[in-house]
Amino acid sequence: MILKYGQSLQSWIHEWFKPLAYALILLRKDGLPCIFYGDYYGIPEKNVHPMKEKLEKLLWARKYFAYGHQIDYFDHPNIIGWTREGDYEHPDSGMAVILTDGAGGSKKMNVGKRLANQTLYDCTGNISKPVYIDSDGNGVFYVNGGSVSVWIKKENNYEENK
């Protein structure tokens, strides 16, 4: 079957929600990495704008930081998160991901001992203020309303390393 306009269903995903869905697909331990052509390059005849820049940041985060044990923080109806503790095979790996389909907010999460006493920053660029991780690996991570933030070590800046 040939699909017209890039989708088989008549229901479209809202543009603001796509980065949240892709964070779940790409950055979780059990996620199946899949990106739709129309989301990456756009579908001009349907006024679907390309998300290439946003998706490349998530793909970059997956490639270098989405490793190790995962801890879920699904304890709020609108703000969820998870951490990946990293591993020794991937230097500087580990991350915290927080997203919301409602108003912005924060969540205390543990990123493990490997990232203890480090400064993390949001590689999506949605939050500019860094997060400081304590000696136990805990930090308070922030997210803007209707968005996702992916927190990694500050030295690993996407713009400088792409």
Image (cartoon, grey):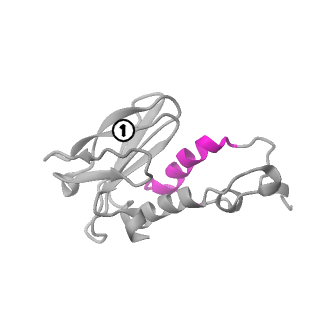
> Residue visible at 30% across and 60% down?
86
Picture coordinates of residue 114, whole percent (x, y) = 20, 58
In this figure, what is the number of numbered marks? 1
Amino acid type at image mark 1: Tyr
Task: Residue 22: tell me if it is visible.
Answer: yes
- Residue 40: image quadrant is bottom right
The answer to whether 131 appears left or right of 73 in the picture is left
The quadrant of the picture occupied by the N terminus is bottom right
Picture coordinates of residue 95, whole percent (x, y) = 34, 54
Crowd tier of the residue under label 1, counting other residues whose Cα lies within 10 Å: few below 14, some 14–19, many 20 or above: many
* Residue annotated with mark 1: 142
Which contiguous range is marked in magenta? 13-34
Picture coordinates of residue 147, whole percent (x, y) = 50, 41
Q: Is residue 85 above or below residue 143?
A: below
Under circle 1, the secondary element is strand
Q: Is residue 25 magenta?
A: yes
- Residue 50: image quadrant is bottom right
Task: Residue 32: tell me if it is visible.
Answer: no
Q: Residue furthest left?
A: 135
Q: Is residue 33 magenta?
A: yes
